[in-house]
Image (cartoon, rainbow, N blue to C red):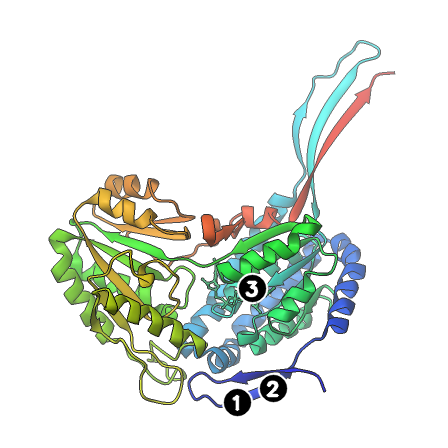
Amino acid sequence: MADTISVINPATEELIKEIPVDDSVIIADKVQQARAAQPAWAATPLADKIAAIKTFRDLLVERADSLAATLTAETGKPITQAKNEVLSTPQRIDFFIENVAQVLAAQRVYQEPWQAVPGTGQLEEVITYDPLGVVVNISAWNYPYFVGANVFIPALLTGNAVVYKPSEIAAMTGSEIAALLHESGIPNDIFVPVIGTGLAGATLLEHPIDGVFFTGSYATGQKVAMAAAPQLIKVQLELGGKDPAYVCDDVDVAAVAAGLADGAFYNNGQSCCALERIYVHTDIYEPFVETFVQTVQGFKLGDPTEPDTYLGPLSRKPQISVIEQQLQDAVAKGAQVLCGGQSVHRPGWYFAPTVLTNVTHGMTVMGEETFGPVIGIQRVSDDHEAVALMNDTDYGLTAAVYSSDRARAVGILGQVRSGSAYWNCCDRVSPQLPWTGRNHSGIGSTLSTLGIANFLHPRGWHLKRYRK
Ligand code: NAD
């Protein structure tokens, strides 16, 4: 009998269903199918590829309710946030559709004036782009529509075949994404789902492929990079973060505190760019902390299928132990728990939203990714101290500064290593801007025109026309 993934509802701990996983024979077959089909897909006119992706986009909107319900059932994401994810994905798709032709267009970068002398002629230099070929997309569960579409939409539009391994935590959603793409006209052997755990992901990387686009943790990303290294293929890694915000002394404290609480706790803190550390200028520290805690205590925790629930359960049970260990370490070293600090007594993997003060960088909660509803708030005496603390991390995904002075904020952000820099905002992704990280937050970028070009091999043409 085939192995299965047991899909458990994190809010009720009930088994939703068993999904059979693909074994190594099936995986080998799927990669070969994609390999055989890819040249015909590359040769398919761009207009036909765009038409299929537009249909997919329209189906997402049309079926948003039922797609969001699946996502909520298997990950515990509150239904309003799940629906927001499904309905915001078309924005990214539209960006790719509108910009792919421009990225694919051949560019004549040099042309000599025509030489009239016999034996000479004219040199022309042109850049064209070819698809990578067969790319593997190994995906995370926390935003399966967003992080999936960031990869498979531009990959398909640029003529690649995609072997897509959704996370085992969002396998039902992954299967629904594949069914929708096939229904939209993407051939079955051009978008090929592989269902399984990390073992299926590792098995995929043993096959000859032309690129791996991974979204997940630093620890797994490192394994993926090492497994892909012998093939010398393109490796793109969108990994975790320990994202900081610094609140200067010149802000509207109430508004900023409310915004930052959302940045830390949206999706239960299970966002790669969730705020995980907040530094507050000493002059406004007390009122900031007070308003922040009040906001957090106002968040409605409960049944994720109810539209006004803001905090559902965690998507993975083992994460509760990670959080508990970080809290024990923090408290033992002097942190103060202003709210939360423990699991919630009800069925499901619920953890109360937790605000810590008196934190230091000697605590794991200020160094390692928490990926849960916990935030540490640290007092700082000036901008220099804030910069030093923001940079004191292995990660570098995003950084935010709140100030009424743009020059001050931009000056601070310029000194912080991060892929995204936010002034007076946080936890924000834009299709127009590259989504990228420094250090342990990853390699490469999705979104923006760079996130389309990453699925292409450039070719330099040296073209000489000779005069006879
Ligand atoms: P994860 O690393 O546990 O798993 C990611 C994927 O890798 C899953 O599909 C998993 O099955 C697969 N996998 C596991 N072991 C593998 C192996 N040895 N070889 C190949 N594949 C393997 O991460 P997760 O729990 O799914 O996601 C949470 C992490 O993702 C967090 O660290 C979060 O910050 C990060 N993330 C980053 C971004 C970003 O854009 N930077 C976006 C979303 C999530």
Specify whether 31 is left or right of 107. right
Please identify the quadrant where the N terminus is shown.
Answer: bottom right
Amino acid on which disc 2 is placed? Glu
How far is mark 2 from mark 1, CA to CA? 8 Å
Between disc 3 and disc 2, whose residue precedes?
2
Residue 272 found in image quarter: bottom left
Q: Residue at x 30, y 70 (%)?
A: 327
Task: Kindly indicate whether the residue at mark 1 contacts the one at mark 2 (C-beta within 8 angstroms).
Answer: yes
Residue 348 found in image quarter: bottom left
How far is mark 3 from mark 2, CA to CA? 23 Å
Task: Kindly indicate whether the residue at mark 1 contacts the one at mark 3 (C-beta within 8 angstroms).
Answer: no
- Residue that carries the numbered disc 1 in the rendered image: 15
Please identify the quadrant where the C terminus is shown.
Answer: top right
* Image disc number at residue 18: 2
Specify whether 69 is left or right of 112. left
Element marked by disc 1: strand
Element marked by disc 3: helix
* Image disc number at residue 148: 3
Amino acid on which disc 1 is placed? Leu
Amino acid on which disc 3 is placed? Gly
Does residue 183 lie above or below 162 as drawn? Answer: below
Which of 297 and 319 lies nearest the eye of the viewer? 319
**In the rendered image, is residue 315 in sight?**
no
**In the rendered image, is residue 136 in sight?**
yes
Which of 308 and 138 lies nearest the eye of the viewer? 138
Q: Residue at x 37, y 57 (%)?
A: 242
Element marked by disc 2: strand
